Image (spheres, rainbow, N blue to C red):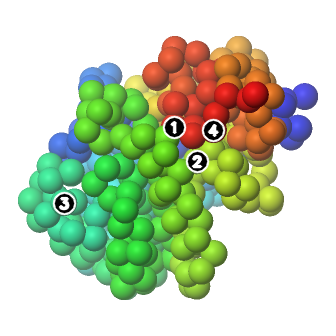
Amino acid sequence: MPNDAMPQLQAPLTINWAINNSCNFACSHCYSREDTHEELARDVLYACLEKVSKAGVFSINFGGGEPLLHPHLLEIASFASGLGLRVSMNSNGWLIDHDKAAALKQAGFSKVGISVDSHLPDVHDSFRGVAGSHARALSALAHLKLVGIVTSISTVICRINSTTIDELVALAQHSKVGQLNFHNFKCSGLGMANKDSLDLSPEEWKDFYRGAIAAKHSVKGLDISLDDPIIALLDARDAGSLVKGSVCGKLSLNIKANGDMTPCGFIPIVIGNIVRDDLRQVWKESAVLEKMRNKQPTGKCSGCSKYEDCLGGCTARALALTGDMNSPDPHCWGSEPS
């Protein structure tokens, strides 16, 4: 049995599907900007969505690139929703006005997350590479809320915002979103190229998570989501979580624009293709997923009292920076066991 003691699901609960590579932004941390693979035709996507639904997947979260640049997004989402799939999306918000928000609601989107990386417009705009993007993101949230779509804010934590937790929380409350997602910085794509200027030191990550956990416990009416397994070092992992360690390859799977399946968007290891391969078979038999589900402690993880909950932290980050998914997460502030 996997080392987090959870029976393996027959299929992922959620698929994060990057249906296009095109984007109208130039983000400093983008993981997919260098992905130039061709995109699947609409009819092929329909067939793939039918396969995914029949396999038992519960929800699809569309991403990219910027998914709203896909010419058939609304039709694809409507088709997926008609299959019984719960449909959501992550967007930079630039293209969402009232009419687009209403069309997204009509297409079956139940939730849309908008990226906002700073309470300061100029800082956000510089990070995202487009002047005016902060104002458009907040406007998008208002339009989405008005038509009845559940909204959230996604914030990539890095050097531009790690000490502004209170301000980010206030922004989320002012925008009346239900959830604020603090995403740990990944060293993938441009994130790797810019890691020296954007990533935090392990001690800085510790300070950030102490503050974020305090906010999570004290702020009412806002779900502050922390997706980093290393918060187990601060005894902050959710006791009700379905899995320990990373959820990638255990609860979720990533599909790229050309149909390639990877464990997550930040792990560029292709384990199959949704067009030609059986999803359940890949999910069950992939040697890469098996290794991720059964990580072995190495280095300072060996003998660490938190390893059972943390399972080495973020697998994508460890793989990107060390070449070994079993290596300790480079963000970990824990010391070598004595």
**Residue depicted at x 64% and y 57%:** 84
Q: Position of residue 29 (x, y in %)?
A: 30, 40
Q: Say which of marks 4 and 1 sits in front.
A: 4
Could you give the CA–CA distance between mark 2 and mark 3, rounded to whole angstroms?
24 Å
Callout 2 touching callout 4 (CB < 8 Å): no
Nearer to us in this view, 46 or 23: 23
First in residue order: circle 3 vs circle 1: 3
Give the class, few, some or many, for how many residues have Cα within 10 Å of label 4's Cα (few <14, many ≥20).
Answer: some
Q: Say which of marks 4 and 3 sits in front.
A: 4
Location of mark 3 (residue): 123
Give the class, few, some or many, for how many residues have Cα within 10 Å of label 1's Cα (few <14, many ≥20).
Answer: many
Could you give the CA–CA distance between mark 3 and mark 1, rounded to whole angstroms?
24 Å
Q: Say which of marks 2 and 4 sits in front.
A: 4
**Residue depicted at x 54% and y 57%:** 209
**Residue depicted at x 18% and y 68%:** 121
Toward which corner of the image does residue 141 lie, by quadrant? bottom left
Give the class, few, some or many, for how many residues have Cα within 10 Å of label 3's Cα (few <14, many ≥20).
Answer: some
Q: Position of residue 270 (x, y in %)?
A: 52, 18
Location of mark 4 (residue): 334
Callout 1 touching callout 2 (CB < 8 Å): yes
Considering every residue shown, the one lying at the far left of the view is: 131
Residue at disc 1, secondary structure: loop
Location of mark 2 (residue): 228
Q: Position of residue 203 (x, y in %)?
A: 49, 45
Could you give the CA–CA distance between mark 4 and mark 3, rounded to whole angstroms?
31 Å
First in residue order: circle 2 vs circle 4: 2
Does residue 190 show up?
Answer: no
Disc on res. 331:
1
Could you give the CA–CA distance between mark 1 and mark 2, rounded to whole angstroms?
10 Å
Amino acid at pointer 2: Asp
Q: Seen in the image, is 132 located left or right of residue 272?
A: left
